[in-house]
Image: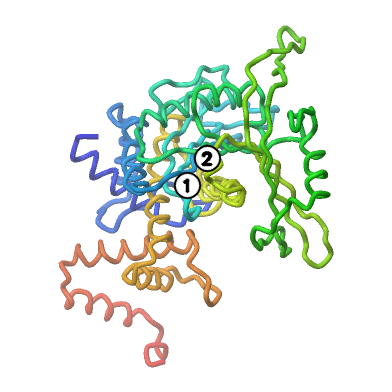
Amino acid sequence: MPDSRLNHRYLEMVKGHFHHSSPTATGVAVPVSASKSLATTQATWRFFNNDRVTPLGLVEPLRHFARHQLAGADYALAVIDWCKLDYKKHTAKKDIVRISHEQDIGYELTTHLLVSAENGCPLAPIQMHLKTANGYLSTAETVPASADHHLPQVLPLMREAAAMELPTTLVHVIDREADSVFHLREWDTAGFSFLIRGKDWHVRWRDELVKYSTIEARLEAEGAFRPSREVSIKGKSGVQYVAEVDVVLDRPATSKVNGRVVSIPGEAIALRLVMAKVVDPKTGEVLSTWYLLTNVPSEVPAERIALWYYWRWKIESFFKLMKSGGQEVEHWQQESGEAVLKRLLVASMACTVVWSLQRDESSESVEFKQVLVRLSGKRLKRGRPPTEGTLFSGLFVWLRIWDFLTERDYDLEKITKIKTNFDNCLPRGIKDV
């Protein structure tokens, strides 16, 4: 966006998305400097419907920020996931699409989110697709075909990310939906690193074709599992144990062709199978078990692989932040998928600023975050770090104060006069309390 006016409006919109929105919010928060809210509403509409404001242009600041944050990192996690944006009650949106059943109406969002492999902090979304009735809208150079479901989108996402020349090795992390022989073989052949959670399928191990659960049982009998870390799961405390073996994926893939299931043979690929299970230390009950498949080199220990997959949930937190944790995307009034995608990217930049502030532990940042907690009006348990929602609320108040003082040119007489007017509005007796 080379136009200075568009850049200014973009920054104003990012600031507007620091507001911790409610479902009844009518749009982007109006800045203090705006003389009329209607003018701000019109400027917002023009921004999202301006042909010069493109998804590709709006995602570039996010990518630039990610490049800066990843300098010196050996690895970064590139988490891919999908979520539905429910708009079945939004009759003004003419390009909403049926996603599964008749009542499942809205848009489907694909997100490629960078997460630090060092501490699990989210950094920035670097790619988005939005499925509409008219096909996909995207930040990518190559937009997915209308018929593409989830997994066919992944290889192009990997290639687009590689073209960004990020200064690190990306490990693409996907949930169990990605346990597809065809696609794992495709990604490995193309030279991309991945980490996925597997279903209980067959692999070749010790010259046998066995299920993951069979391998788990044998390793348990051999005492191969070792404690990794203490965790909390569904309100229960547990200890995570991990074990690892080398396996070969050589079975044929399967696909439906004209209603029939057909086999698709392919080259065998060598993978690491990392098994992670959480055990209740008091009862011995197994609370959770993961079968993780990866082609990441063995220099990354199994404990680290298990932790990386755990950090996949950062993308679920991002979706929650967009939906009910502050942005209320499913109540936005934009009338097209294109406008919604553009606003998603602007809101993502606001998220990126908050994430950056969250992980900054410098003395100045810690002090600033304490100020934001006070301005937010929210309560935190002693010793707990401020949540994203708290920082959003505090930042919004702080920015409005800054804008207000700037508008007043720091004229203390004017500010004192406003305080006096407020005091005069108070009922008699309260002013002296």
Q: Mark 2 points at which residue?
A: 79
Q: In this view, does 265 lie to the left or right of 222?
A: left
How dense is the environment of label 2, judged by Cα within 10 Å: few (below 14), some, or many (20 and up)? Answer: many
Q: In which quarter of the image is residue 58?
A: top left
Above or below, 115 against 342 in this view is below
10 Å crowding of disc 1: few (<14), some (14-19), many (20+): many
Please provide percent x and percent y for residue 12.
Answer: 29, 49
Say what secondary structure mark 1 lies in.
strand
**Residue 115: which disc?**
1
Which of disc 1 and disc 2 is earlier in sequence? 2
Amino acid type indicated by mark 1: Val
Q: Is mark 2 on a helix, strand or loop?
A: strand
Task: Identify the amino acid type marked 2.
Answer: Val
Is residue 86 visible in the rendered image? The answer is: no
Q: Which residue is drawn at 24% across and 38% down?
A: 6
Q: In this view, does 331 lie above or below 326?
A: above
- Image quadrant holding the N terminus, namely top left
Image marks 2 and 1: residues in contact by CB distance under 8 Å? yes
55 or 62: nearer the viewer:
62
Quadrant containing the C terminus is bottom left
